[in-house]
Amino acid sequence: MKVKVQGVVARLAVAAVLMANVAAHAQDRVAKPSDAETQTAVADYNAGNLTAALAEFRKAAERGSRLAEFNYAMMLLNGEGTPANVDEGKKWLRKAADANMSHAQYVYGKMYDDGEFVGRDPVEAHRWFLKAAQQGHVQAELALANQFLDGRGTERDNKQAFVWYKKAAEGGDMTAQYVTGSFYERGGDGVDKNLNVARAYYAAAAAQGDPAARLKYQELSTQLRDRKEVKPQ
């Protein structure tokens, strides 16, 4: 089977080692024998020793390391250090997700949302995004908000969309900061209109390089200045 790797899995593969390392160690408080094996695998992966890293991740994964399960899955799906093996990769990704690793849950959900390596299933994607978002995973919070806004995989609910956009915005996501600002700018859906708060969220997104947010920040600054309602950032 020839696999065309694209979308979320391809984008996350290289970053997965570092991102999942943080997530896994925040959740695993007790050192395990597999931890040392996993760290050796991380070092080999970062050094480009993919064949060695693959074997080390597998060994640690078989000992129950969620980080190793996730990274072994990513290497299998992307064909790093081995020919791509989608079925085996999905199996290990599901193991990490079932073990409550938030990043694995997000990636598993994204696969279903995009129809990447699996049939597209927005309802299944929603289930996994929710699991990850409830653990504070910012990308999952944004994905969940988008689903509620679009009515994809769940009933359309702008109030719930706002809740999750705001959480993702507070977690530093630029897109969520812009959208949260737009909610406050227009008001409604359980959100009180507040141009000063909207301006602050636009400012946060603008500071991360969002040109549309910069324009909105300038626009609201002008409006508020004309009304003499500008508050310090």
Image (spheres, rainbow, N blue to C red):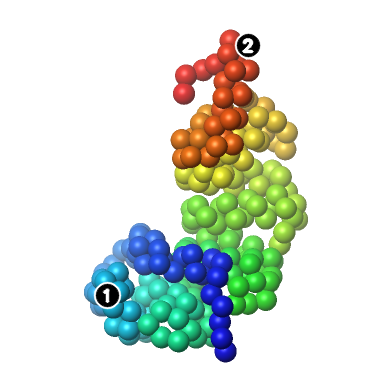
Q: Which residue is drawn at 48% across and 84% down?
A: 84
Please name the amino acid that badge 1 sits on: Asp
Q: Name the residue under label 1.
A: 44
Of residue 112 and residue 214, the one placed in the foreground of this image is: 214
Query: Residue 201, can we see it?
Result: no
User: Tag 1 or tag 2, which sits nearer the N-term?
Assistant: 1
Q: Mark 2 points at which residue?
A: 227
> Which residue is depicted at the point 56% across and 82% down?
3
Q: What residue type is labelled 2?
A: Arg
Would you place residue 171 above or below residue 216 in this image?
below
Residue 141 numbered mark, or none:
none
Depth check, front residue: 134 or 188 = 188
In this image, 11 relative to 71: left or right? right
Q: Is mark 2 on a helix, strand or loop?
A: loop
Residue 212 shows in the view: yes
Q: For this view, does 69 lie left or right of residue 129?
A: left
Against 172, residue 71 (above or below) is below
Instruction: Give how far across and how far down residue 164 sits, in percent.
Output: 59, 47
- What secondary structure is marked by label 1? helix
Horizontal and vertical percent position of residue 97: 50, 71
Residue at image position (65%, 29%) is 185
Q: Using a 10 Å C-alpha cutoff, classify the residue at mark 2 as few (fewer than 14 neighbours), some (14 to 19) or many (20 or more).
A: few
Q: Quadrant of residue 167?
A: top right
Q: How many labels does the image show?
A: 2
**Quadrant of the frame with the N terminus:** bottom right
